Image: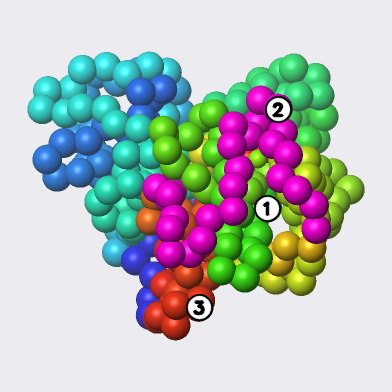
Amino acid sequence: MTSRWTTAVLDTDQPGGWAVARSPEGFLFDDNGALFPREWLKRQDLSVLAEHGIGHLDGEPVYLLELRSHSDVPGCNWKGLRAFMLDGDHTVYKVLGYAAQIGTWAREHRFCGNCGQAMIQVPRERAMYCEPCDLRSYPRISPSMIVLVTRGDEVLLARSPRFVTGVYSTLAGFAEPGESAEDCLIREVREEVQIEVKNIQYMGSQCWPFPHSMMLGFHAEYAGGEIVCQEDEIEDAQWFNVHELPPLPASRSIARYLIDVYVARRLGHAEPVLPG
Ligand SMILES: NC(=O)C1=CN([C@@H]2O[C@H](COP(=O)(O)OP(=O)(O)OC[C@H]3O[C@@H](n4cnc5c(N)ncnc54)[C@H](O)[C@@H]3O)[C@@H](O)[C@H]2O)C=CC1
Ligand SMILES: [Mg+2]
Ligand SMILES: [Zn+2]
């Protein structure tokens, strides 16, 4: 299967193509979605911070206009990336997720972290460059482990105070320097619920552009301990029977995929497919 969306570093001096506009309020959209004819979009009254050529959608070039602030465009509105993730065309969400990560990274790397001088976009490469320091900064990706811990018919799910009311999810956390994926997983499960795990199995990965996580998904079996929730991070954690699950995370998340796969295996149903 050929992919509808491929990333590329495009020359912003070339005319034409599609463009998306991103402000701190999210992406601009109208009845046709979030992709606009680029020449039309550039004629609107937008406070453009930077333009990036980000890839091809169905063979057409796509650009990002990263804005300082949002402004009123007749017939259009602004919407956050999360809303595009929850609903609508998955390929468009992938385009916007990539655009958001490039926009965030370029915005946060306008100045050199070493000497503080202005950095420049490197032509034909996704990098910001400081000439005096000969320093290149590339888009940042933060590896995060996410794990479904199980004990027979039971799955361990937890709530962060940040979650939507009632929703329980798998445990997750960012890798620290010096850790393997497995080290991180074991540490996060210990820190968040004081449970020990065994038989760690890699299940798949997912880009999570909020703002730049790369989720590495695992399954692990319970090996010991009683649940003790980490203060401030975990509001509640419980063992749930696969027949009596609480409200779960969004269907496009890897958290949901990890849960759905295990439930399907226990119940002998067809396994779901991880959204890319
Ligand atoms: N796609 C999915 O299904 C899910 C994705 N996630 C994502 O996984 C990531 C990690 O989950 P959490 O439980 O929030 O992490 P966590 O358990 O490591 O705790 C969050 C804390 O980590 C620190 N932190 C923030 N950004 C960091 C970074 N880039 N590197 C290192 N430490 C950082 C902060 O102190 C923050 O309060 C988040 O981006 C979250 O949105 C979480 C659950 C489901
Ligand atoms: Mg966590
Ligand atoms: Zn510098």
Q: Which mark is residue 231?
A: 2
Region rendered in magenta: 224-249
**Visible in this render: residue 60?**
yes
- Residue type marked 2: Glu
Local crowd size for mark 1, using a 10 Å CA cut-off: few (<14), some (14–19), many (≥20): many
Residue beneath disc 1: 145
Between discs 3 and 2, the one toward the N terminus: 2
> Residue 131 at x, y = what percent?
75, 30
Mark 1 or 2, which is nearer the eye?
A: 2
Mark 1 or 3, which is nearer the eye?
A: 3
Local crowd size for mark 2, using a 10 Å CA cut-off: few (<14), some (14–19), many (≥20): few
Going 76% across and 24% down the picture, which residue do you hit?
113
Going 55% across and 39% down the picture, which residue do you hit?
159
The Cα–Cα distance between marks 1 and 3, rounded to whole angstroms, is 22 Å
Going 43% across and 64% down the picture, which residue do you hit?
243
Count of all numbered marks drawn on residues in the image: 3
Q: Which mark is residue 265?
A: 3
In this rendered view, identify the residue nearer to me: 178 or 57. 178
Q: Main secondary structure of the magenta part?
A: loop
Local crowd size for mark 3, using a 10 Å CA cut-off: few (<14), some (14–19), many (≥20): few
In this rendered view, identify the residue nearer to me: 228 or 262. 228
Q: Quadrant of the C terminus?
A: bottom left
- Asked which quadrant contains residue 156, the reply is bottom right
The Cα–Cα distance between marks 1 and 2, rounded to whole angstroms, is 20 Å
- Residue type marked 3: Arg
In this rendered view, identify the residue nearer to me: 83 or 262. 262
- Please tell me whether residue 232 is drawn above or below residue 54 in the rendered image: above
- Please tell me whether residue 203 is drawn above or below residue 211 in the rendered image: below
Between discs 1 and 2, the one toward the N terminus: 1
Left or right of 16? Residue 216 is right
